[in-house]
Amino acid sequence: MTTYRISQLAERSGVPATTLRFYEAAGLLPADRTPSGYRVYGEDAVERLAFISSAKMLGLALEEIRELLDVREEGVCASVRARMLPLVADRITQTDGRIAELRAFSAHLAGVHADLSGPAPAGACGPDCGCTTPSTTAAGPVPVTLSPTRIEQATESWREAPVACTLGGAELGERTQQWQRLVGKAERREEIDDGLRLSLPVGAQLAGEVAALAAAEQGCCAFFDFRLHLTPTALQLEVRAPESAAGMLADLFGVPA
């Protein structure tokens, strides 16, 4: 019977050891202990991790994945498929809602951009110049909260989320580079409670990139809280994380840990 130490399983599966420990604590990945206390995983661990990763890519919550694994243990594929069908249907509904929110935000950005692209009035700004009350869009800032995958979660659920990332080494490195490129465009950086606020150049394309990257980040790191704000003259991204995730916040955004 093949068994794996945690370092061997991490290398074989591409899942970081920290995530393997988290999966064990969450009841997703059983492990035995050697007499000296080392973790030992069974030969089905690689296939089990593949199933977990696939389920997470569908946006399933940990408790749903745990339930699916219990059904999977029974050895009847039809039962697993029957349980997955309503879960996937629910994710389709949620995803459609998120797409609608982002499309509305994109339309707002386009309206602001169109107003600001027109001729500027002579002299100082005024109520009708378009800088503070664009004629084709709603007045004032438009907040867009990039909610967690499960839309019914409470606003502060990120504070309770486990500080663990599901990305492998290569994916994590690529994601870090993506954030660093975006952070490099910031015109201003401010520390806020639990995180920071980045002020970026206003623009529909950049706002779309920020929204897409933040949504992708929440798919693997639910402990991050992202809030995107558009004003006529700036694009602001607020990022918050629990205190225990200060190191990852620093890695991605360059803030002091």
Image (tube, rainbow, N blue to C red):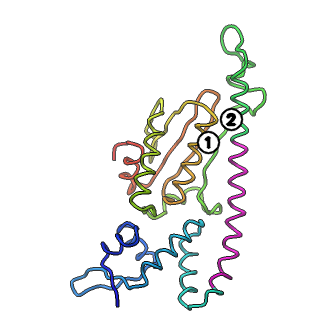
Among the two numbered marks 2 and 1 on one chain, the one whose residue lies closer to the N terminus: 2
User: Which residues make up the magenta segment?
Assistant: 80-105
Q: Which residue is mark 1?
A: 208
- Tell me what residue is drawn at x 48 percent, y 58 percent: 223
Question: How far from the left and from the top, in percent, is residue 213?
Answer: 54, 48
Amino acid residing under circle 1: Gly
Quarter of image, res 2: bottom left
Q: Is the magenta region chiefly helix, strand or loop?
A: helix
As drawn, 195 above or below 58: above
- Is residue 122 or residue 89 the one in the foreground? 89
Amino acid residing under circle 2: Leu
Badge 2: residue crowd in 10 Å (few <14, some 14–19, many ≥20): many
- Tell me what residue is drawn at x 60 percent, y 90 percent: 76
In the image: residue 178, left or right of residue 115: left
Badge 1: residue crowd in 10 Å (few <14, some 14–19, many ≥20): some
**Rounded to the nearest whole Å, what is the CA distance between mark 2 and mark 1?**
9 Å
**Farthest residue in the left direction?**
36
Circle on res. 154: none
In the image: residue 35, left or right of residue 176: left
- Is residue 140 or residue 202 the one in the foreground? 202
Q: Which residue is mark 2?
A: 109
Residue 89 belongs to magenta span: yes
Quarter of image, res 244: bottom left
Question: How far from the left and from the top, in percent, is residue 119?
Answer: 72, 15
Tag nearer the camera, 2 or 1: 1
As drawn, 37 above or below 207: below
Residue 156 belongs to magenta span: no
Question: How far from the left and from the top, in percent, is residue 11?
Answer: 34, 70
